[in-house]
Amino acid sequence: MGASDHTLTSIEICAGAGGQAIGLHQAGFSHLALVEIDQYAAATLRRNIDRRDGWEFEREYCDVIHKDVNEFEPLSELEKPVAYLGGPLKEGDLDLLAGGVPCPPFSHAGKQLGKDDERDLFPRMLELVDELQPKAVMIENVRGIKDDKFEDYRDWVVARLEGGVAKDPQTGEEVKYEGIYTVCGWKVLEASDFGVPQLRPRAILVAIRRDVLGDTEFVWPTAKPGAVTVRAALGPSMTARFQQFVDQGGVRGAEAEKARKRWEDARDGIAPTLVGGSKKHGGADLGPSRAKAAWKLLGVNAMGVANSPDEVEKKESWERDLFRPEGPMLTVTQAAIVQGFPEEWDFAGDKKTEKPLPGKTAQYRQVGNAFPPPVARAVGESIARVLHAARPAGQARG
């Protein structure tokens, strides 16, 4: 095998542009597969795995799979992981199955149709748990799933994992389920508590197989002291964007100086939740009216996404992107920083399709729909501690 006996393996569904994958990677997990239906996000995953230092395991052993997770067959279709595992993935081999299943069925911003929403992938996630029987399970979703109206649905998810009686979401009939997991909690974590300059509460379920958990206690991560503000996170990159025009002098330089002063004089604080927007509607912005108003107080124009510093001269978009009285728009890279991505993470969005999206729109949607990497890392580290404690010293895999 190509890795140490202490390697913790993972598969992630609905991987998006890699927010959860980055965090779990930082927590010590090595990915065997990342499954994502969006072509741009899948391209982002491939691009960064191919280029980034520290992702050597994934370059050699991880399949990035662009397909509907309903069609994903992990016990038969994985290719690269075979070289690491010494054969096809088998039931019980995997350390962690993780996924940020689609949020719209439970989001306050939508109709909250829950089980009746065709985008609900909790059933498929649980089918994969049954197939793989991983040592640990991590499921992320919006805070709305904790609403009272979804209590029966949550009870069903827990019963599927732990065993017990719960109402089948489709028939409404009580069913007795067998389960091999302990659900360690379904907890709402706030991203700003973990160094992310954004209010982004996420509901996270963690379950550990009972034979693995034993007498070990799973401990949820605790908030880090001191919040990171928008000014602290974006200060250097915003200064550089203005300086590009200040150095030119003249009228444009004077405009840049005034715009920079407006940005510096604006209120500092934590950003509202970034949203990814709908593919059915063109363009990208930073959220609904309330979010736009909050961004305006922070000195940011939330009505769109700026061109990158390399493009702004070519497209002559400095007035639109930087000099408006409402403040500068964020670039995709700056939005990603607000989401907690490493600054070097590169987003794809230029693949030609029948109805191509503008590059930065496709890129921004990946950012807005992501799970903040620092939160994924914190939860991943808590899971990893349990899994390492359950593995006898020197125990080999396979």
Image (spheres, rainbow, N blue to C red):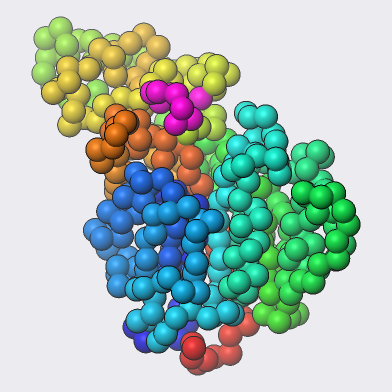
Residue under the image location 31 percent in, 60 percent down: 49
Q: Nearer the viewer, residue 274 or 219?
A: 274
Q: Nearer the viewer, residue 398 or 131?
A: 131
How many numbered marks, from 0 up? Answer: 0
Can you give x and y, in whole percent of width and height, for residue 132 in the image? 58, 73
- Name the chief secondary structure element in magenta: loop
Is residue 282 on the magenta stretch?
A: yes
Residue under the image location 76 percent in, 71 percent down: 179
Is residue 40 on the magenta stretch?
A: no
Q: Is residue 32 above or below residue 138?
A: below
Can you give x and y, in whole percent of width and height, for residue 190 in the image? 62, 43
Quadrant location of the N terminus in the rendered image: bottom left
Residue under the image location 85 percent in, 49 percent down: 172
- Left or right of 118 in this view: 161: right
Q: Over which residues does the magenta segment extend?
A: 278-287
Q: Nearer the viewer, residue 35 or 270?
A: 35
| Residue 20 seen in the figure | no
| Residue 129 seen in the figure | yes
- Left or right of 174 in this view: 125: left
Residue under the image location 33 percent in, 11 percent down: 324
Can you give x and y, in whole percent of width and height, for residue 27 in the image? 48, 65
Can you give x and y, in whole percent of width and height, for residue 240 in the image? 24, 30
- Left or right of 245 in this view: 192: right
